[in-house]
Amino acid sequence: MKTACLTALSCLIACALAHAQVLVTDYGVQTSIAGPGAPAHIIGLQRISHVIAMDTGVKAYGLQYTIAHDDKRPDIAIPGEGYIGMSQPSGQNWYGGGFFDLQINGQTIGATRIHSLTSRSVGDRGYADFVFDTALSVVRIRFVTLANSDALYCQALLEPKTEIKSLRVVVRCYPSDFVSNGDRHVLTPVRDIAQGEKVELNLGKECWLLYYDRIYDAGYTSPGHTGVGPCSALWVGSQADKVGFTVGGYGIDTAMTLKPQLRDFRFVFFDHAGQRNDAAMASLRARGETLQQELSTFVFTDPTIAGWSLTEKQAEIQKWLAAVPGDKEFAARYEQWRKELSTGLKAIQSGEPGAIMAEANAARIISEWERGVPELRLKALLNGI
């Protein structure tokens, strides 16, 4: 009996792992007025925030788009401390107020209002796409999580509109907590860099970084503060010309000068919240080389959009529309979506310039299309009673 129960339990666990998914939650757009405590240049302005959470089963990452808006300059986004933040799992470490900034020819893409922020769960993956249509380039910042993984994969993909002379990514963290009385350090594969030091990395040997605090280790407490643990980043070494930083006593900004001739840039981020420094160090040392190899060939493409069967979906919709012939609004809506998707899906499959925007628009339409199906089906069923 005991053996049978253990066998059944093992089968249940195996089935659960085989069908593991990433839980993706879109909290939608929230607005407020920036008040005291906000950066001085946005106080009194409308603040726009949009959070997407991706729970892999072992780690929950929250990604947040936050900017301010001035009615006198409606086409301009005004970042406070940043525009793409990581609000979970901790909010410190990779900063919730803005941890990732891409600069093209010296201009941050964050000053352009976002075109779209979409998310979805597909198989064992979660996706969050930040798409910007700037004067210099169309840019998609895609974050991907895998079920039962603690990693947050990131791709910056560009479709330039003009010559790109310089590219720079700046990532910001506050290791373990927002404290200024700690002992900040940054570990690379070959050395430990202490607070106050300014360094430029040897990219042939140093392509991952672990940011930690020797005092505020995970679980360490002082009045008003508790250490959550370190954070880390890894990237493809061949994509950068220079990476440097100063180990600050509070926050740490790491500047990566990227090769301007490339169009595809890849990173992996970890928030080791709940993990002590020594455990995170051992993990990254053991996984670093494998992660770099994986990242260089990681497939960021979402095949479910390019391969979405418009013909099949349209046939299903036509069946339900036939049952509600008087509903002209639904019919017109789905016909418009059909036309847009017919063009957009072809552009995605071509891979030519314009594919980023086509995919962003297709993802939005597909989401709206699928959200509308239950309502249409219910109307059809009620009409048949």
Image (cartoon, helix red, strand yellow):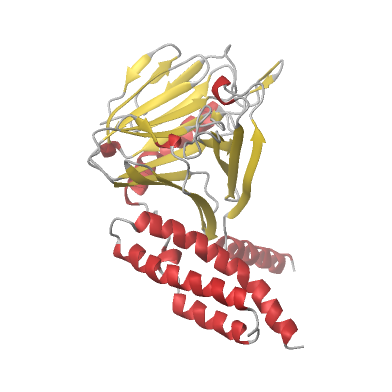
The answer to whether any part of residue 59 appears in the image is no
The residue lying at 41 percent from left, 59 percent from top is 359
- Residue 378: x %, y % from top left: 70, 77
Dividing the picture into quarters, in which one does residue 68 lie?
top right
Query: From the viewer's perspective, is residue 188 above or below residue 248?
Result: below
Residue 377 relative to residue 188: left or right: right
Residue sitting at x 63%, y 29%: 34
Residue 384 showing in the rendered view: yes
Observer-nearest of 368 and 286? 368
The residue furthest front is 72
Q: Quadrant of the C terminus?
A: bottom right
Q: Position of residue 171 (x, y in %)?
A: 44, 30
Q: How many marks?
A: 0
Q: Does 231 sit above or below residue 59?
A: above
**Residue 17 percent location from the top left of the image:** 57, 60
Considering every residue shown, the one lying at the far right of the view is 385
Left/right of residue 109 with respect to residue 122 in the rendered view? left
Q: Is residue 250 above or below residue 95?
A: above
Residue 176, image x, y percentages: 57, 25
Q: In which quarter of the view is residue 95 placed?
A: top right
Between 272 and 63, the one lying in front of the other is 63
Residue 246, picture quadrant: top left
Q: Is residue 239 above or below residue 222?
A: below
